[in-house]
Amino acid sequence: MHNQIRSFIAGAALLAVAGASQSAFAADFMEPMPEAPYVPEVVVPPSIGGWYLRGDVGYSWAKFRDASYATFGCDECGSGIGENQLDGDLKGSFLIGGGIGYQVTDYFRTDLTADYLTRSKFSGSTVGTCTSGGAEFACTSNDSSKLSALSILANAYVDLGNFNGFTPYVGAGIGGTRVKWSALENTIGGDFDQSGTEHHDGAASWRFTWALMAGVSIDLAQNLKLDAGYRYRRVEGGNMFAGSDFVGKGYDDGLSLHDVRLGLRYQFGGPSAVAYAPEPLPVYK
């Protein structure tokens, strides 16, 4: 009986030793699996396909391209019907504008803009002869007025690539400009003994306009750009002032406008960084 008990105890001890050896072997064969590190990933979507708003301020130099008006037969103006030329200059004036556009691709965009040219002072003159009582006299005419203009243009641009945040571009536009002249003050001088000042009501009209642009945009923030550029606008001719008893309507030959503009462009739905954490992946050793 005692021999059986001793055999049972010895067998149990042998099994316990064998189980411990197998656990140690398994621990040596496979180490615990560590957790995968948290690695955030940044995804930047492409910068194409976004609407944008723009606002601009600037300064414009206008080139007056002469004007013409008819003269009717009378003792003061000479006999018959003729045509006189009015030469003059326009002062520079400030420009303010804005618009809405769409970035079609990374290299092409379009927008619709409206720009208002504040009043520009005009001063001009004519030199000729006047007659009175059958005698001719040298006479001059000094003229003054003011011009303002509103341009609405549809534009297209080619962005030439982004170079460390600087994007040069070229563009072109077509549209119309409403040119408004104030009353023309016409003062006759020289040797003519009936000198004086006449007022001719100014005229307003829409004219066809085309434009060429070049400039550079600078990245200020993720969706905000500073835009600095030059624009040339060619405005066709039209009515300048109303006629009187001795002078017919005046027609200017058009304007050449040289604009320097500085503005901001804000793009909606542009590139935005979206960070997320992928699912941890198991790491085996």
Image (cartoon, rainbow, N blue to C red):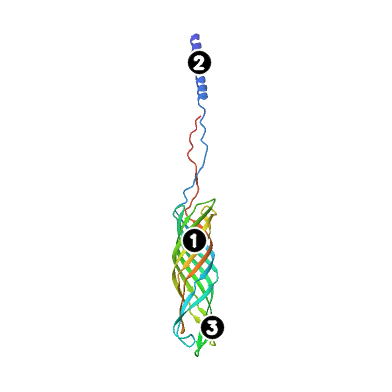
The residue beneath circle 1 is 213
Q: Closer to us: mark 2 or mark 3?
A: 3
Between the C-alphas of marks 2 and 3, the distance is 137 Å
Q: Residues within 10 Å of mark 1 (few under 14, many from 20)?
A: some
Front residue of 173 and 66: 66
Vertical placement of 50 versus 98: above or below? above
Type of amino acid under label 3: Cys
Residue closest to the far bottom:
133
For image coordinates 49% across by 58% down, the residue present is 170
Comes first in the chain, label 3 or label 1: 3
For image coordinates 52% across by 24% down, the residue present is 28
Contact flag, marks 2 and 1 (Cβ < 8 Å)? no
Q: Residues within 10 Å of mark 2 (few under 14, many from 20)?
A: few
Type of amino acid under label 1: Met
Vertical placement of 235 versus 141: above or below? above
Front residue of 5 and 97: 97
Front residue of 125 and 27: 125
Q: Position of residue 69 (x, y in %)?
A: 46, 78
Contact flag, marks 3 and 1 (Cβ < 8 Å)? no
The residue beneath circle 3 is 139
Type of amino acid under label 2: Leu
From this viewpoint, is residue 209 visible?
Answer: yes
Contact flag, marks 2 and 3 (Cβ < 8 Å)? no
Between the C-alphas of marks 2 and 1, the distance is 95 Å
The residue beneath circle 2 is 14
Comes first in the chain, label 2 or label 3: 2
Mark 1 lies on a secondary structure that is strand
Mark 3 lies on a secondary structure that is strand
Between the C-alphas of marks 3 and 1, the distance is 43 Å
Q: Closer to us: mark 3 or mark 1?
A: 3
Comes first in the chain, label 2 or label 1: 2
Mark 2 lies on a secondary structure that is helix
